[in-house]
Amino acid sequence: MTLLDLARGPGLYWSVIIMITGLVWRLSTVLLMPYRRNLSAPGARAKGSLRGALTTIVTRTSPYRSFRSRTMPALMLSYTFHFGLLIILLGGAPHILLMKTATGLGWPPLPKGIISLASGLTLAALILVAIRRLRHPVLRLLSNLDDYFSLGLTILPVLSGLLLAEETYVSYELLLAIHILSVEALLIWLPFGKLAHVVLVVAGRAAQGAKFGHKGAIT
Amino acid sequence: MPSSETLGEELERRGISRRTLLKFATAMATSLALPPSMSAAIAQGLAKTRRQSVIWLSFQECTGCLESLTRSESPDLETLIFYFISLDYQETLMAAAGTTAEDALFQAAADNKGDYLLVIDGSVPVADDGVYAMTGGRSDFDLLQKLSRDAKAILAIGTCAAYGGLPKAAPNPTGAVGIADVIGDKPIANIPGCPPIPEVLTGVLVNFLSFGRLPDLDEHGRPLAYFGTTIHDQCYRRPFYDQGKFAKSFDDDGARQGWCLFELGCKGPVTHNACASLKWGGGTSYPIQSGHGCLGCSEPDFWDKGGFYTSLSGGDAPPWRTAAGAGAAGLAIGAAAAWNARRVRSSVDRQVAQEWQEKKEGDA
Amino acid sequence: MADFMETSPSENGIVAALMGELGALLEKFLETGVRDSIDLHRIPLTDQDLLELEQQLGTGEITISFDALGESRITETAHAGLWRVEHRNPSGDLIAHLVEVGDVPSIVSAGRSEMRAAAAAMTNDHSSSGGPANA
């Protein structure tokens, strides 16, 4: 069995299964874990925890105004690669083809030039994020294996995908195998590290928002 | 009977002119993708060599490879058999049958000991002592061992002989393997394809005749001259691939305009063969030109690489039922973890309540 | 069927490139005496390209045809020193298609060893008075 056969066969099968199991596991624990009811009285101008939860999900998209200038560079980098990944995944023809093969759902792709541009920007942003994390003294103190591993696993598919689209340096077959395997590694790791924020970000913001909404401290 | 005269002498004796040989060599240079100036060297090589004894063994095959060989236009099989090789054994083409044929086989091997070219099509089954392919009471496995011993070189023709091919496809009940999996001590060239292109077959034969050795091979034992590039790299539909113009289903608008067949399962990017350049039918067409994606038939185990119509971007994703099962498993684990946490929390609460109670009673 | 004289030049410029290369080979022959050729089967030519190439090459005075396990035909082009060579197999399939550059196509010249054999045979014929010739 060649590397590509592994990637397109058992690799794809098991990575998807592990990802689904892991994500459902984490989501269900978030919903089912015991929590202490907040028995304190609501704050003076509190609008309630439900409103707080819903508002915070949206408002956390952009930092509080007094932090904006300080966090803007990091924020720009982050949004660049997040939107870049979205464009690549939803607009790239081979990815749409994968979705179509798996679910029957297809849609028209974006031109290859736009995907290339998005990939380049995404890769640059991710690399800058990595450099920042390695040089910033506080971030260096805080960062653990999860941070670096998750970053690496995100960079590898983008880089291998770019090389594959340009069909350069290495044979198509090897590049395709590496690209698919790197995505599968990402899928397997996804539920268990910080990358799980893809599904947990909403829950996290909602929990914070509920707490502050009860206190009347929504910003 | 091994001949003592060279091919050049024999051809002259039979009235085949030097010009005829030169013309043949010119066509060969084209077929071998060598520069036209090489034709003189090919002609010289051929003239100096002796009539090459060729023994052709057929194992687990469908005879498609021989059929392909008979379609070669340059050189055609008749010219090869009449003038350049001595096809001493070939079960489909030879007139003899039964024990006469068997005798011819072993006689030819003995007469040309160390000099004959052993050409094999079909895989060889090794399960159950090789009982699944027998010829004249002997297993093909034994026949292979016996006849490869004194061969000068071996040509494994077709994907079955090269890598196991169709008989080897899962679950491989007969234990089929390629020739190179059995024989390790002879030079072997694999000429895969299901079947191989006719001119590739004859081209390798003539290469052997002209230069006395097998051509340069890649890591899968295939002649680099024909298998050095992928279909994708030579395909005339490549501009459409680069522009993102793909046919979505057979005979749709894109297909009619000759767009790339990647989404219909074409394995061109990972398949090495000469189909896109040499083509079939003497350069008439090849599968992609006729509207069907490449099957990857010159690659090992191509029958077991997922569906022919699943694109390289697709694969064996789990079916919905299995995915739902995975979700259920995740839910079960999560619920178990939550249940355990609640149980621990309850016992902590109970303990705290008890301590509080004891403290109250203690104060009272 | 397009009118032969009105074929428009194809957009890929391959025929112009081929004519350029043939011109260079012709110069090389004039300098060094080495005959060379271009194999048309090895070059991706569309039918239109082929038509255009034939137009540009044109036809000269000499046509040579011979049977050597199938018909072969050599046509002098309108350019001195350029020859179109077509080899066919006994079934009539085109098995080689070249443009050769030189004073005369290499396959046409008689071989020296054959000429020596013929000369020896003719001398023997002369010397022995009408008896059977020794090869």
Image: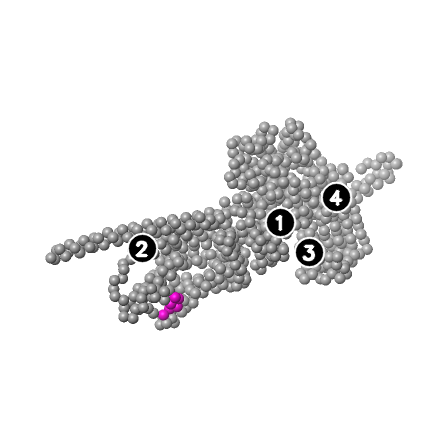
Decide if residue A147 is in sight here.
Answer: no
* Mark 4–mark 2 distance (CA, rounded to whole Å): 85 Å
Residue at the spot 52% in from the left edge and 31% down from the top edge:
B129
Q: Position of residue C76 (x, y in %)?
A: 78, 54
Q: Residues within 10 Å of mark 1 (few under 14, many from 20)?
A: some
State the CA–CA distance, disc 3 to disc 1. 19 Å
Residues tagged 2 and 1 counted as in contact (Cβ below 8 A): no
Amino acid tagged 1: Pro
User: What amino acid type is highlighted by mark number 4?
Assistant: Pro
What residue is at 68 percent from the left and 41 percent from the top? B70
Q: Which mark is in front, 4 or 1?
A: 1
Residues tagged 2 and 3 counted as in contact (Cβ below 8 A): no
Q: Mark 2 or 1, which is nearer the eye?
A: 2
Extent of the magenta region: A58-64
Q: Secondary structure at mark 1?
A: loop
Residue C133: quadrant of the picture: top right
Question: 10 Å neighbourhood of mark 3: few (<14), some, or many (≥20)?
Answer: few
Name the residue beneath numbered marker 1: B287
Please name which of the two marks, 4 or 2, marks the residue nearer to the observer. Answer: 2
Q: Is residue C57 left or right of residue A41?
A: right
Q: CA–CA distance between discs 2 and 1?
A: 59 Å
SS of the residue at dot 4?
A: loop
Q: Residue B69 versus residue B291: which sits nearer the camera? A: B291
Q: Residue at x 76, y 40 (%)?
A: B16
For discs 3 and 1, the disc positioned in front in the rendered view: 1
Question: Which of the pair B6/A189 is nearer the observer?
Answer: A189
